Amino acid sequence: MSQYLDFAATKGNPRLVMPDEFRGDLDLLIITGGADLSATNKAFLGRKLSYQHGKTDPHIEFFRTFLLDSYIEHKIPIFGICLGFQLLAAHFGSKMYAHIDGHDVNTGLHMIKSKNHEYKVNTSHHQAVSILGSDLEAVAFSGAGCVNNVECVEAFKHKTLPIAGVQYHPERMYNLLSSSTFKQTGSLVGDLITHELINEIMSKNAKGN
């Protein structure tokens, strides 16, 4: 959790929000990583579930069911990381891979590509977005050579709402003072795509769009 707080501190004063608590005064809500997205989620309908479908977090499921819509309706900027990314993707009609072999905490790094960037990020998930919902715009994909040669959406943003997310863990990515990310953002934590997405959704909210 300290890594998430350190990361959130790059955008303001961080505070913890409980899954059963609505806070309308937030400048940015970060939905963190965690357990698997529930196998009962409609994102998995019509897809073969793996025996490796893991445990779910009842607190996250409560938040998804009862509070997420309130944050969306109040147009509070929302950024999802890993499970948070999948939760938001599923909420907006995306379809999911229930399991991809080799995508776990011990896999290491894999390449992602966006319109302006190409670099390696950490691999710490085994569920992934396969078909992105129509309200969402893909920003980055896993590059060629991804595990099982499956190309997955690695980052997205909502077409109209201040919502975005990434599949990897930017809070675990630390930058040298000489790195391009630090030079462009001044941050010792995170990556360029993540910083650009968060700045965009926070700016979109500030403008009232």
Image (cartoon, helix red, strand yellow):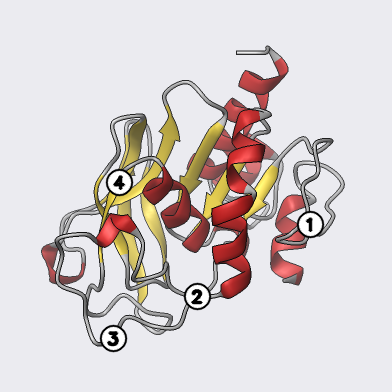
Real-space Cα separation, disc 2 to disc 3, in angstroms: 12 Å
Q: Horizontal and vertical percent for residue 148? A: 13, 70
- Quadrant of the rendered image containing residue 156: top left
Inspect the image, locate mark 1, and give the three-letter code of the amino acid beneath it.
Val
Q: Which residue is denoted by mark 2 in the rendering?
A: 35
N-term mark: 4 or 3: 3
In the picture, the quarter occupied by the N terminus is bottom right
| Residue 83 disc label | none
Specify which label sits upstream in the sequence, 4 or 1: 1
Q: Give whichever of discs 2 and 3 has the lower sequence position.
A: 2
Give the residue number, with chain letter if any, for mark 4: 94
Amino acid type at image mark 3:
Gln
Q: Residue at x 61, y 20 (%)?
A: 204
Is 198 left or right of 54, judged from the image as shown? right
Give the labeled residue for mark 1: 17
Residues packed near mark 3 inside 10 Å, few (<14), some (14 to 19) or many (20 plus): few
Q: Read off the residue under disc 3.
A: 52
What residue type is disc 2 on?
Ala
Instruction: Please state which of residues 133 and 39 is positioned toward the viewer in this rendering.
Output: 39
Q: Amino acid at mark 4?
A: Ser
